Amino acid sequence: MRIHFFGATRTTTGSMYLFEVNGRRLLLECGLFQGRREESIQRNCCFPFDPKQVDAVVLSHAHIDHAGNLPNLCKQGYAGNIYCTFATRDLSGIMLVDSAQIQKDDAAFVSKKRAKHKLPPVEPLYSDVDAEKALQQFVAFNYNRPFPVLEGVTVTFRDAGHILGSAQVVLDLREGGREFRYLFSGDVGRGDDEILRDPETVENVDYLQIESTYGGREHSVRTDADETVGRLVLETLKQNGKVIIPAFSVGRTQQIVYVLNQLTLAGKLPRVPIFVDSPLSVNATEIYRLHPECFNEAINKFLHEKANPFGMENLTYIREVANSMKLNDLKEPAIIISASGMCEAGRIRHHLKNHIGDPQNLILFIGYCAEHTLGAQIVAGQNPVNIFGEPQAVRAKIISLDTYSGHADKNELKRYVERISGSLKKICCVHGEESQCLANAETLRKMKPKAEVLVPEYKQVVSV
């Protein structure tokens, strides 16, 4: 068996791995590469293999860096099944169409700039029609239900605890008279999540491919996170300020809504207006409610015995632009949660423009902001920052908490590997900036001295 590492190699974006086994081709993940514009365009539009020659696709979860290029794959000729969990299929249904709209808007913006130089327009990577056609190729399976995908290849999804429906992908392989197990971790959750179950333990693993997003870093202690949020929000509301929370539509939005719900029920926060202002976040939250099979015991109990964990009398979900614009006229204290979490697109930029200059307000970051993004600039203390091309003075209080991260840190990844049984022969560290992958690899070499630990580079081929 040979594995071609075509993405998320010494970086966190564009996950894509092509397996050659028994003369067939299996593609694991098909994510969008996000980085410098020219490189991104080239990497995303042109696959380093023929999509028509792929026999099956397996998807671990719905995040765009893992699933975002599937419509383009199908557009270029892939006609087979795309295997995933039920929740991943449903989330992909909204996220890929949303991604198509972003592609369309981005192409229009670039084309407008090119027109000034009398250059031809550029086309979006794919359309909403392409996204909807790709969704017809999705085939869903529950966790812990083995299913064959190719000759000699059986797949089982195990809960990864990262986002709703996220899976570790277990490949049980039969090749040349031998049998072995290859585990792709997907994105590994931290455990003790407010909503999701802990990552499951996988047994009898021979080969491991593991994410390394925080392979060399430790998160803050989670037990204090909810109390910290309650204290910061209450302080802001008491001084008649507003709390602006940039949050990813899938995962972090639902998590912070649940936390605010619990703090309000416990009497630690007043019932001030809370707004979730993002169409994608609203749709994603509705899908969360459809998949209690992914919930942990505590939230399942709350759901059955008390109320909707993502709903309160003082909570309003906003889809329409007109209702979003009305938030600009709010005079009383309020909490506004909006996408995107890195502040690179979406309605959050409007809320930042309107509120980042007021010292009474709080801008609360609860997720990872990649280098060079607007969110990263704000967190780093840059002042002023450019929003919609205009400098905005930063006077609001800026706080960033990494305790709500959906990715396991250095020690949590270590515990994840410690729980895996089997004689690991080879480990590949992916999905992390180079420093994080190398740090994770060093940790794993000390843990598993008999295993060969690799940090693959782009287009590297590894034999098993």
Image (cartoon, rainbow, N blue to C red):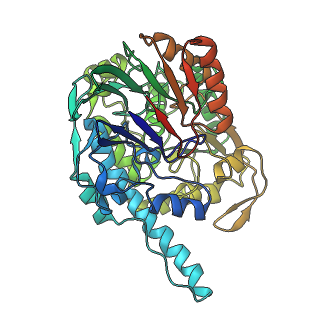
Snapshot quadrant of residue 198 = top left
Residue at 49%, 35% (x, y): give it.
462
In this orientation, does residue 346 appear?
A: no
Residue 358 lies left or right of residue 214; in this view the side is right
Q: Nearer the viewer, residue 103 or 450?
A: 450
> In this rendering, is residue 294 above or below 289?
above
x, y (%) of residue 439? Answer: 67, 26
Q: Position of residue 48 (x, y in %)?
A: 45, 55
Name the quarter where the C terminus is drawn. Answer: top left
Q: Is residue 153 left or right of residue 72?
A: left
Residue drawn at the location 55% of the way across and 59% of the way down: 40
Number of marks present in the image shown: 0
Residue 322 position, x and y percent, is 42, 65
Looking at the picture, tell me which residue is in the foreground, 119 or 90. Answer: 119
Above or below, comparing residue 199 to residue 249 in the picture? above
**Which residue occupies the extreme bottom position in the image?**
118
Q: Residue at x 41, y 34 (%)?
A: 163
Q: Would you place residue 221 above or below residue 327 in this image?
A: above
- The image quarter containing residue 297 is top left
What residue do we see at 51% from left, 84% from top? 120
Image quadrant where residue 229 sits: top right
Q: Nearer the viewer, residue 179 or 216?
A: 179
User: Residue 277, percent across and down?
Assistant: 45, 52
Q: Is residue 231 visible in this depiction of the protein?
A: yes
Which quadrant of the figure contains the N terminus?
top left
